[in-house]
Amino acid sequence: MQKKIVYLMLCFLLTHSMVKAQVKSTEGGEQYRPQIHFTPKAHWMNDPNGMVFYKGVYHLFFQYYPDASVWGPMHWAHATSKDLLHWVEQPIALYPDSLGFIFSGSVVVDKNNTSGFGKNGNVPLVAIFTHHSMEGEKAKRTDFQNQSIAYSLDEGKTWIKYAGNPVLHNPGIVDFRDPKVMWYEAQKKWVMTLATKDRITFYSSPNLKDWSKETEFGETLGAHGGVWECPDLFTLDDNGKKVWVLTVSINPGGPNKGSATQYFLGDFDGHTFTPISTDTKWIDYGTDNYAGVTWSNTGNRKIFLGWMSNWQYATVVPTTNWRSAMTLPRELQLKHAGSDLFIASQPVSELSGIQSKSIVIENLKFADSLDLSKKTGSVKFPCRLNFSTEKSSDFSLSFSNDLGEALLVGYNKKSNQYFIDRTKSGKSDFENGFAARHTAPRFTNKPNMNISLVIDVSSIELFADDGLTTMTEIFFSTKPYSKILLQREGKAVIKKLEYIKLKSTLPKQ
């Protein structure tokens, strides 16, 4: 017994010292540590979970393994923010238990106390999540994933698991997970959007405890290159008309291989989702925006956040103390392009709060190529680069260093596609498919173009044509990029170019 105690103490001291060292290195800037994107201080992170806005605070829960930088027994870790950019990590919210690991799910504000969990006027926050039984999976049962709930009466600080878990038992579907719950006011009930292998199944409940099946959607619609997971159901406004949105993450099977998130637009009557069209559409065409969902309790504002990685290489990227970041939070809107309707994404307006004074250049004329770093001064990441042109034509931006490493982003008019090329962006030998050129369609036929890029030390996010086309990609340059070269065919005029340095949001130690 004494030897065991000594061993546990040594393990604790070693872990404690590693975390302290990691925190110290964050202050000085780890090589690939994002400066304006959320990352855990240490260890493994994947899907965002339980995102809820309550009393002026944005809560972000996320899939987390606190003992290593690779996937393991899943917990719900917790971080909070008042501006969606500066995050403070809180104690782990939900730990694995006898029913299994804590997989993805959501959190709602039960303001009417339908669950009965509220006491002494305290409004309960209720988490709905998937319990994943490893024993059941190893035994090759089909019912090893079930839905459970927990509640908080102190604004998300501590959580109590419901004694009657699970509240929704698996009928025998191997993939039965990731409940996203919303209040459907018209029928005074909760609606659960659940991923069920190759389709979505809707359930409803009056109290978050007793659930009834409504309908299924998607068995023969959309992309089916991999399992469906991490769905979301919400509304967006289209010139005064309410349009329902159903997002579904799929892995693999994305437009540029691996993980990606598709969406459907349509109508929902509390029972059935009816799509406007059956075309497959994607929230983001890059390879590193997955499992994203929206914050609940934000009113008409719909704010989306994704996991900035891809299951093709997430566990082997060249970071050590930590793995994975989240995308920038993005506000979603509907936009028309031609006869079609799309979801457009833009960084949340709060990003302006960390902007330094911008360098603006108007009517910039050049032939073939231009070294932008001579116009903007020393290039530092993170930064934002916005530019607009009166005519659409081929262009490319090269972010490079003196080692010959370069990340390319641009547009090809012949194919009518935007692209991000990380073939020579830096380290890539950790996975065969990482070094590649990825493309995304342009949806508008307007002659003018407007491009916004947000670049962190190891990621780039492209928002083109007011967010109609978005691409998110991570990269790992051996040395920081120091030069930006803009290339276009023949003589070109940039109507307006804006270079903005962004202040780090990492906590000061």
Image (cartoon, helix red, strand yellow):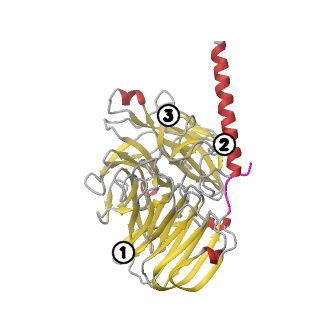
What is the three-letter code of the residue carrying label 1?
A: Asn
SS label for mark 3? loop
Q: Is residue 158 left or right of residue 268?
A: right
What is the three-letter code of the residue carrying label 3?
A: Pro
Identify the disc placed on residue 416: 1
- The residue shown at (60%, 44%) is 78
What is the three-letter code of the residue carrying label 2?
A: Gln
Rendering quarter of residue 284: bottom left
Confirm whether residue 358 shows in the render: yes
Neighbour tally class for label 1: few under 14, some 14-19, many 20 plus, Cα within 10 Å: some
Q: Is residue 446 left or right of residue 348?
A: left
Q: Is residue 333 left or right of residue 14?
A: left
Q: Which residues are magenta?
A: 503-509
x, y percent for residue 254: 36, 56
- The residue shown at (65%, 41%) is 120
Residue of label 2: 22
Q: Nearer the viewer, residue 122 or 282?
A: 282
Q: Is residue 249 left or right of residue 157?
A: left
Residue of label 3: 73
SS label for mark 1? loop
x, y percent for residue 358: 66, 74
x, y percent for residue 378: 66, 69
